[in-house]
Image: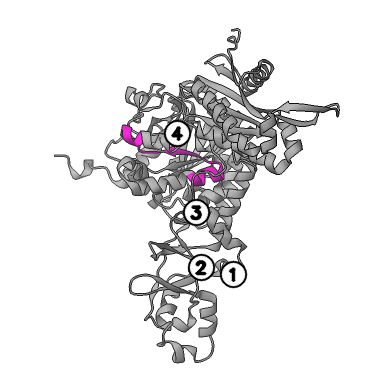
Amino acid sequence: MPSLHSIPTGASLLERALRPGGLHAVYQPIVRLEDRCVVAHEGLMRHADPQCTPLHLLDLARAGGRLGELEMGAVRTLAHGFDFDRGGRLLLNLSAQAILQEAVRPQQLIDSLRASGRDLGRFVIEITERDVVEDVARLADAIGYLRAAGVRIALDDFGNGHSNFWMWHELNPEYVKIDRCLVHGIAQSPGRLSIVKALVQVAESLGTELVAEGVEHGRDLMIVRDLGIRYAQGFLLGRPQAAVTTAVPEEVQQAAPQKLPVWPAAGRRASFPRITAAHLLIEAPSVGENASNGDVEQVFRQHPDLPALPVVDDSRRPLGLINRRVFNERMAVPFARELLGRKSCIPFMHASPIMADVGQGIDAMSEILMGEDQRYLSDGFIITREGRYAGVGTGEALVRRVTEMRIEAARYANPLTLLPGNIPIAEHIGRLIEAGQPFVAAYCDLNHFKPYNDQYGYFRGDRMIRLVAATLVRHAEPSWDFVGHVGGDDFVVLLQSEDWERRCREAVAEFDAASRALFDEADLTRGVLEGEDRAGRYATFPLTTLTIGVVRAAPGVFDSADEVASQAAAAKRRAKRLGLSVYVLDPEPMPA
């Protein structure tokens, strides 16, 4: 049995860790799910004494006022031992507390990273925090120096501890790591699934990549993949070890799709993943209809950030809202507390609060912003579940989410069809090429659309274009096939479905039949449109139909989205010249 003198104390453990060689490094791989490649590693410090866990060591350093010293020692150890040529990017943990207390200064960290001799763009600093971060603005300012040097930022352990949406918004990290507590067991937990779905939607709006931590089971990995999360980390993908790895376990290869999914950030329609009032819900206290003004005052005192207090009946159905500012002003009148304190709170309540069900979509809720009743700005609104009180939402959150939705729609979508435009089309083609995934690019165009538009006007012309969009979407497999709207009557469909040719031919047949309802009976009887040709002379034109030119994009044939688009357009022109509804072009492989 060891003597009491041989048992290391906390102080001796910390001193040993701070000496040269007191820490050693292990690295856990991070896998990009779309192509199952190891693209980065998280560096993790380990104490020479295996019984001293990293969390215990951090607590010792925090208590001893030496947290910054320990973290900088870990950074140097991890950066020095990392194989950048094989390991990709290196993620390093740094606490917000150490930065705010200036125990770690940005320039000191930059100098330590530069000592590795590597481009600073190869480093990602994970901001971790176990305590509330009160000065997020100052933290963001300090991080700005790292960004200016090329370092990327990640927010760690989101969903656990004190990582929050305000930090996400203010720090604007390139990556957010979803904590293990949300990812582990997600396949069997509807609650975890709902939370992570909401995080995916937030990430899309803020332009952030997500990393799922704690992936230990294949079924959880498949859920993470299907949600559109691009990166994952966990024991299933690789355990922390001294050397970096480039191998992905066979179980992961089997769980990954054989086709490249249409990730929401790159291939969505502008309707986007559904966002509801549930995503804005804040759990907040309420009072019963028998509560006194004194009870209300006490709740407001206990919750200083609560803008309004819901009043509910015995069955938890909302009756109204008490505005904090109005209530406090009336209770501040001389002798008001003595006269009103024990009386019912109902006279202070607004009996017609703005309410929304948890399932109400954000698009429908945007009508609140256009209504004459602007109390949502000061009171917020009540959120119900099956008619009973569930929580509240703030006007600020609603305005911000609706604004983000509209900005995203304007950026990514064609305003007529709400389909992704040129930028998402190019991005998705690039992802397919990079992943070495075979696909076909179908360029869809209307024949003789200009005479139709000239004769019937732009309103009916827009109806025809929307018919094309609806037809193409209906014949695409949403998990694998991407439908985009280049502009005008030009569309691009990127298909990975094996029966892509059947889908194209059926789409043409369905459109040509359905579009007849958009012509006048006289034109249908004649079978032609009358109008002027490009020289201004009288001419007749065939009825408008759909043509699709297809190019096969096997791995290694194309190097860029530009080349794919060019060849698909050439296939479309060939189809029109030959009078074919569908024409397939097989390009030759690019020379080595």
Q: Hey, what amino acid is under mark 2?
A: Ile
Instruction: Name the residue at 42% across, 31% down.
Output: 30
Q: How far apart are the two marked residues, 1 and 3, measured between alpha carbons?
A: 19 Å
Q: How far apart are the two marked residues, 3 and 4, measured between alpha carbons?
A: 28 Å
Give the labeled residue for mark 1: 373
Q: Hey, what amino acid is under mark 4?
A: Tyr
10 Å crowding of disc 2: few (<14), some (14-19), many (20+): some
Give the labeled residue for mark 4: 231
Comes first in the chain, label 4 or label 1: 4
CB under 8 Å between callouts 2 and 3?
no
CB under 8 Å between callouts 1 and 2?
yes
Give the labeled residue for mark 2: 354
Instruction: Name the residue at 27% across, 42% down.
Output: 8
Q: How far apart are the two marked residues, 2 and 3, measured between alpha carbons?
A: 15 Å
Q: How far apart are the two marked residues, 1 and 2, measured between alpha carbons?
A: 9 Å
Give the side of residue 364 with respect to residue 23, left or right. Answer: right
Residue 208 among magenta residues = yes
Q: Toward the viewer: 316 or 164?
A: 316
Q: How far apart are the two marked residues, 4 and 1, measured between alpha carbons?
A: 44 Å
Q: Which residues are magenta?
A: 201-221
Comes first in the chain, label 3 or label 4: 4
Query: Label for residue 361?
Result: 3
Residue 320 among magenta residues = no
Q: Residue furthest right?
A: 536
- Secondary structure at numbered mark 1: loop
Comes first in the chain, label 1 or label 3: 3
Q: Nearer the viewer, mark 2 or mark 4?
A: 2
Comes first in the chain, label 2 or label 4: 4
Q: Toward the viewer: 37 or 152?
A: 37
Comes first in the chain, label 2 or label 3: 2
Instruction: Name the residue at 49% across, 52% down.
Output: 165
Give the side of residue 559 with respect to residue 99, left or right. Answer: right
